[in-house]
Image: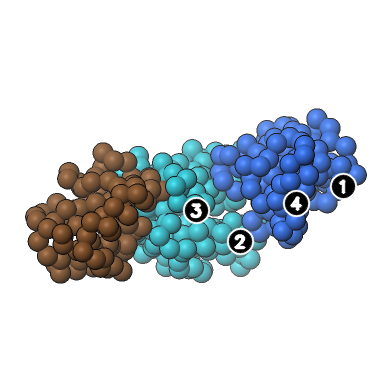
Chain colours: A cyan, B blue, C brown
Amino acid sequence: MSDVKKFMYLNRRAPYGTIYAWESLEVVLIGAAFDQEVSLMFVDDGVFQLVKGSDTSELDMKNFTPTYRTLGDYGVRHMYVDKASLEARGLTQDDLVEVAWEDWETEEEVDNIVEIVDSEQIAKLLAESDVVFSF
Amino acid sequence: MGTINVNGKELEVDEEGYLANINDWEPAVAEVMAKEDGLELTDEHWDIINFLRDYYEEYQIAPAVRVLTKAVGKKLGKDKGNSKYLYGLFPYGPGKQACRYAGLPKPTGCV
Amino acid sequence: MADLYTVNKSPFEKNSLEDAIRFSTEGAAILLIEDGVYGAMAGTAVSDLVANTTGRKFYALRPDLKARGIAEDRLIDGVELVDYAGFVDLVAECDKVQAWL
């Protein structure tokens, strides 16, 4: 038995209108210190969290969209996006931020860990996780 | 909330000495803060401070120490990407102290 | 002039936009703010709510669109963008404000 647990962060809310997206991101950033296998899932309005080109300068609010791009450095290995949610919102992968990942020891690299998946894959990924955190 | 005096300007800082407004930053801020800590800033310090400012500009957060260490190693060379080197430069903790000099908020999750 | 209806919830999550349209009167101004601005996007599963409604004027708050990375060329034809000053003008011009949360 391995001590490494599979953590899944399930994000279903739009950013900026409520605090959920930022709270989830903060927990991921803090939790990254614990060396678990961390994945993020974006479903429903959660897919809006990854839409690039955000400018909050007129809102007096922190722009945390660029922060998702550093999650690979925090050991996040997978960021999954629900295909159906994306399509219902008229979005494609081109609208989303890209997140690079690199293993600092082996120098194995992945250009973009943001991956579009279908319902069946999502069900499987959630079922395989040890813990699911919902935001 | 207190203030620090930089080039005749009173800049607001929080209870831990971090700049209240990141846009108030200028290199002299780091010099003044370091002097209060009894530290002379060298090029090696500035490499880290500038790295932190670039990182914040790109990702809008201050990096966790672990991430800072790895990223510095990648950018400035493996001999600098370890906590011994970074603590040598910033004895109060590379995350906390260097971020403060760089005008950034305290790193998320920093203890 | 008729009332101003503000909608601040995502149309994918709540039916606030649908209700605001359903219970609005002819000539009403419907302003999408905060997560409500997603209702102004073209080519989505809920675009028809705004696109197929006649006799109402739709507005969206520009700073909220910018914060969410929604470019102006992705909006439904006929939706007018307003800034905070435009919001205030709408409030002043309309009889009263109904907030649909």
Name which residue lies at 20% across and 53% down: C58
- Crowd around label 3: few <14 · some 14–19 · many ≥20 (10 Å): few
Q: Secondary structure at mark 4?
A: strand
Of C89 and A20, which appears nearest the observer? Answer: C89
> Mark number for residue B37?
1
Q: Chain of mark 1?
A: B
Of badges 3 and 4, nearer the viewer stands 4
Q: Chain of mark 4?
A: B
- Disc 4 target residue: B3
Of badges 2 and 4, nearer the viewer stands 4
Of A83 and C76, which appears nearest the observer? Answer: C76
- Disc 3 target residue: A61
Cα separation between marks 3 and 4: 24 Å
Q: Amino acid at mark 4?
A: Thr
Identify the mark nearer the N-term, 4 or 1: 4
- Crowd around label 2: few <14 · some 14–19 · many ≥20 (10 Å): some
The percent coordinates of residue A69 (x first, y second) are: 51, 44
- Crowd around label 4: few <14 · some 14–19 · many ≥20 (10 Å): some
Is A107 on the left-hand or right-hand side of B19? left
- Disc 2 target residue: A31
Q: Amino acid at mark 3?
A: Met
